[in-house]
Amino acid sequence: MGPVAAIVGEHQRIAALDFAILVVYLLFTLYFGLLHFFDRKNSWEWLSLFFFFLAVVVSVNSTKWLSYLLPFLSFHATVTIYWIARIGLNYCVFIFVYRRCQRRVDKWLKKLVLLISCAFIGMILVFPPDQATQYIAAWNLVSTLMYIFILVLLIWSLRSKEEGAWYEFLAFCLFASEALLNALIIFGITEQGGWYFFQNFSFLVVISFLFLQQVILAYRKTEKITQEMLLVDKFKNEFMASISEQMVTPLNAMISIADARLHEDDKLTPDQRHDLRIITSVGWTIRSMVNDLLDFSRLRNKTILLQVRPIDFRSVVNEGIERLYYLDFDHSVLFENKIPLGFPPILADEERMDQLLMSILIHAQKKVIRGKIIIEASVKEPFADISIRLQGEGMTE
Amino acid sequence: MNIKRIAILSAVVIAVICVNMLSLFDWDHDPVAKQGVMDLRGWTEGATKPLKLKGEWEFYPGQLLSRLPENQPASFPYIQAPGNWGPSLNADNARSAIGYGTYRLTVVMDAEQAGQIAFRVPLIRSAHRLIVDGQEIGAKGIVVTDPAQYFGQAVPYVAWKKSRKSASIFSFKSLTLTMP
């Protein structure tokens, strides 16, 4: 009782606070639900359900927001929903803690709690509310025993120094005391005052810390995985670069020996000469592949540099053709360099130009079964127009 | 677990329990109803501050009254509000909260305190009617003596009325469905 302004103000204040608590509980429901999809091992789904049931209980209490949200609900239905939510939230908090401390709890206890909870829910659904609520004292006793057991489990989990155990313990203490205070308010022993809201607020703050801690843990985990992946990638690049560098030396030696014999030994038979040419061709091809690997590592480390200078493109094409010619054992594919003598030098990185040309020519060689690959070039200021034409069998597109 | 941790844990649990127990005590010095009368004479804070109508209310179990009975008994049964009405309602079965009855409180105030007064009715978990000076100013559900016609509704609301120097507040409750 009091002045109209003060009473209306108090009514609005309580309604607003109840609504805020309801919204926060629903947000926690959503958050822990989402957390469950990303981390299915930590039983967050039970915490999500716990907050959902808690929101239902809050919506039936005090300002009774449920009657505004669902005005068609009868008093009987509201009582049923309220009790199912009360039983549900106790079961959820029990299962959440049980899953965390599974090693210390026998499975039969979980089944017993499930059985008792289902029995009470069954009673609420089957009997009319005035009869079902006769068993409230029994449920309060079961709840108290569950809370004591949960408290013991949480104290145990504190010993394991698990991250978040302190927040869980504090949150549960505040929730249990809030539940006690709720019971006292409903039994008319005390009333909904500042302390009730303070406890609610403290509970939310502690749960928020748990929430924040999970976000920080998830961030750290992602950061650690990213760092590890970067390190593995770096090691892989370094390994590839090292192997490539080690392969270049013996390859060069092999190519040099074969090339020297080819150009300096006049006593070689045509067959021997042919075989040596195949060896040098294969050597050059492998060396270009090793160089590609080296370039790939450099590319990842962003240490690759272009060395642009005037190059004789006709010579580059001739050298490429010579390397590839002997890879085709029956010489069914012929290469033809139609770049005119005296073609002006072009500005490019010779190594990259060679890489590009070889890639295209190897690809073209695979496409043509029998025929000709013709390389042409013309000047179109300020660029050079290069074309590669494929003629013969095997061209399907 | 070391002693320091055990001490902190115990302190947290004890602190929560103690503060809860402390909340049970009446810390404000607002007037309290005694033997069905809330005497607000000389209480100046009432001009700005809401007052909880707690204390001893007259209680008439099994009767729905909107005014005092003609053969008014010499002594009234009193009931603590807020509180459980079960023992006063059914002496034989104190655990049962099913029944109906009337709560009555007389508020006495100074002439300058009289005027527009509002009442915030919290979550009464049964059907009820609120009557001030013989006029019904608020109700939820259907208050009846027949259980078959009973219809419960529990939604908090605000009601107001222009009061005189002395106001009688009646509150009927019937067939509550206990919902602790």
Image (cartoon, coloured by chain):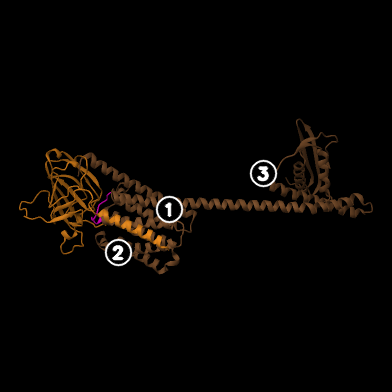
Chain colours: A brown, B orange
Q: Is residue A286 magenta?
A: no
Element assignment for label 3: loop
Label 3 or label 2, whichever comes before in sequence order = 2
In which chain is the residue bearing label 1? A
Magenta stretch: give its range: A185-193
Q: Which mark is residue A210?
A: 1
> What kind of residue is marked 1?
Leu
Q: Nearer the viewer, mark 1 or mark 2?
A: 1
Element assignment for label 2: helix
Residue B120 quadrant = top left
> Where residue A390 sits in the image (x, y, percent)?
78, 43
Image side of residue B177 versus residue A295, left or right:
left
**Residue visible at 40% across and 55% down in the picture:** A49
- Of all residues, the one furthest to the right in this rendering is A267
In front of the other: A101 or B84: A101
Mark 1 and mark 2: span between their CA atoms?
29 Å
From what the image shows, is residue A121 above or below residue B70? Answer: below
Mark 3 and mark 2: span between their CA atoms?
69 Å
> Where residue A378 sits in the image (x, y, percent)?
79, 34
In front of the other: A365 or A340: A340
In which chain is the residue bearing label 2? A
